[in-house]
Image (tube, helix red, strand yellow):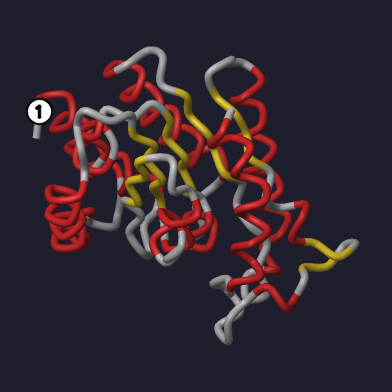
Amino acid sequence: MNQYALLLFLLTFISNAQDPLRFADEVTAIQKKYDTLWNPDKETIVFTGSSSIRIWNTLESSFPKYQIVNSGFGGSEVSDLLAYSNELIHRYKPKKVFIYEGDNDINSKKKPKRVITDMQLIIAGIRAQNANTKILLIAAKPSISRWHLKGKYKRLNRKMKKLSVSDSLIDYVDVWSPMLDGRKVKRDLFIADGLHMNAKGYQIWYDIIKNYVEN
């Protein structure tokens, strides 16, 4: 872990009740996986964040023309990704980084403003590695099990969209709107837990995200 990453780790550890070390084994497993799969001579696109990324099992095969690294880790919050930015993002020297965080943060009663503050630190870290890396912030998705928090998710998404307006190398990827049926969430997009998506849900994500991958 370099000095920059160590500083971020210590700041995160001090400022958050949850201990990022709870993900140490999972992060190590991700690193070992891509030690054998990742080709440093090829351009890389990193998808990272919480379980909606981690369990997207068709992610790499959906974009066969690109070198995709899926470094999602289940149950993570944005502060956890901040702590492990070096291991899960920087080491792959990505051309583009897709980030899905905030879903678990809001459920853990974090305020949208706090989520954005940590997200800005992640962005600053990426910029320190390569000022030209494209960053794509995937909107917090609606879900059946967390629909009672929809107001807070919508506020978080507005703040992420605002970040993209102020930086030409940041895009906001709206997966919220296509997952709605009027003012309600589409119920047939989820597995039994009402939180994680099924193939139909991921098809919606693919249809939206492919344009950001290819352009």
Count how many numbered circles sit on residues in the image. 1
Name of the residue lying farthest toward the bottom:
192
Q: Is residue 11 above or below residue 71?
A: above
Q: Position of residue 20 (x, y in %)?
A: 23, 53
Of residues 78 and 164, the one drawn nearer to the viewer in this rendering:
164
Task: Please give left or right for residue 26 compared with residue 178 in the image.
Answer: left
Q: Which residue is mark 1?
A: 2
Residue 92, by quadrant, is top left
Secondary structure of the residue carrying numbered label 1: loop
- State whether residue 100 is above or below residue 29: above
Residue type, label 1: Asn
- Quadrant showing the N terminus: top left
Please tell me whether residue 190 is drawn above or below residue 192 in the rendered image. above
- Return the residue found at the far front: 65
Say which of 96 and 195 sits in front: 96
Could you tell me which residue is drawn at 13 percent across and 51 percent down?
Answer: 36
User: Residue at left 68%, top 61%?
Assistant: 142
Tell me residue 48's x, y (percent): 39, 47
Classify the position of the C terminus by image quarter.
top right
- Horizontal and vertical percent for residue 139? 61, 46
Frontmost residue, 212 versus 16: 212
Label 1: few (<14), some or many (≥20) within 10 Å? few
Name the quadrant containing residue 91.
Answer: top left
Residue at x-position 10% and y-position 24%: 3
Quarter location, residue 201: bottom right
Question: Which residue shows up at 41% across the image and 36% down it?
Answer: 118
